[in-house]
């Protein structure tokens, strides 16, 4: 592996991981991986008010993209929107019972995939890889 191909190689591995996660999400709930990650985020942050802007920032997506993903989740009964108690101009997002159940199932599927992905790579190597990725990420910003 040459340093000049590092970006390409990261992109290829990223696409392979994303496509596999998307396949798992589609087979389980007919959702995209981003929609599944939104459900997981809402499930894990049920004690706080999550609004669309939080989703936009968390996933680095445009307002229209976030809106479409959230609209689909709401139409399928995975999430609901309620008016914020703090600011009536904002809608708070929360997972419904169906969304919580799906999130639990999807989290288990994704965890199993991650265990397979990590395979027999030693923990120390994975930690070093994560540290290096973090440095690359911050070098870009």
Image (spheres, helix red, strand yellow):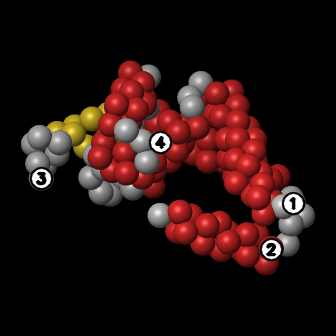
Q: Which callout, 3 or 1, points at the residue further toward the start of the chain?
A: 1
Q: Residue at x 78, y 54 (%)?
A: 5
Residue 140 rendering spot, x and y as whole percentages: 53, 63
Residue 125 — which label?
2
Looking at the picture, how far across and down is residue 46, in whole percent?
A: 36, 52
Residue that mark 3 sits on:
86
Q: What residue is shown at x 37% (from left), y 45% (from top)?
A: 56
The N terminus appears in which quarter of the rendering? Answer: bottom right
Q: Is residue 138 above or below residue 14?
A: below
Between the C-alphas of marks 3 and 1, the distance is 52 Å
Foreground pick, 22 / 62:
62
User: Mark 2 falls on what kind of element?
Assistant: helix
Label number found at residue 126: none
Give the foreground label among 3 and 2: 2
Of the numbered discs in the image, which one, if any, rests on residue 1? 1
Task: Tell me if I can see residue 44 in this picture.
Answer: yes
| Residue 92, quarter of picture | top left
- Mark 2 or 4: in front is 2
Mark linked to residue 39? 4
- Element carrying mark 1: loop
Q: Residues within 10 Å of mark 3 (few under 14, many from 20)?
A: few
Q: Earlier in the sequence, mark 1 or mark 4?
A: 1
Spatial distance from mark 3 to mark 2, Cα to Cα?
Answer: 45 Å
Please report the residue visible at 11 percent of the width from the left and 48 percent of the height from the top.
87
- Neighbour tally class for label 2: few under 14, some 14-19, many 20 plus, Cα within 10 Å: few
Image depth: mark 2 or mark 1 in front: 1
Height in image: 12 above or below 23?
below
Q: Is residue 6 above or below residue 139?
A: above
């Amino acid at each position: 592996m040459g340093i000049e191909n590092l970006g390409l190689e990261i992109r290829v591995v990223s696409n392979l991981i994303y496509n596999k996660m998307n396949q798992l999400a589609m087979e389980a709930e007919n959702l995209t991986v981003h929609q599944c990650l939104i459900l997981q985020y809402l499930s894990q942050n049920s004690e706080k008010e999550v609004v669309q802007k939080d989703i936009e920032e968390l996933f680095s997506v445009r307002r229209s993209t976030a809106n479409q993903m959230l609209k689909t989740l709401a139409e399928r009964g995975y999430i609901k929107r309620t008016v914020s108690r703090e600011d009536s101009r904002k809608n708070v997002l929360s997972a419904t019972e169906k969304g919580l159940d799906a999130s639990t199932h999807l989290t288990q599927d994704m965890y199993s995939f991650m265990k397979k992905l990590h395979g027999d790579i030693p923990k120390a190597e994975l930690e070093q890889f994560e540290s290096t990725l973090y440095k690359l990420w911050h070098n870009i910003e």
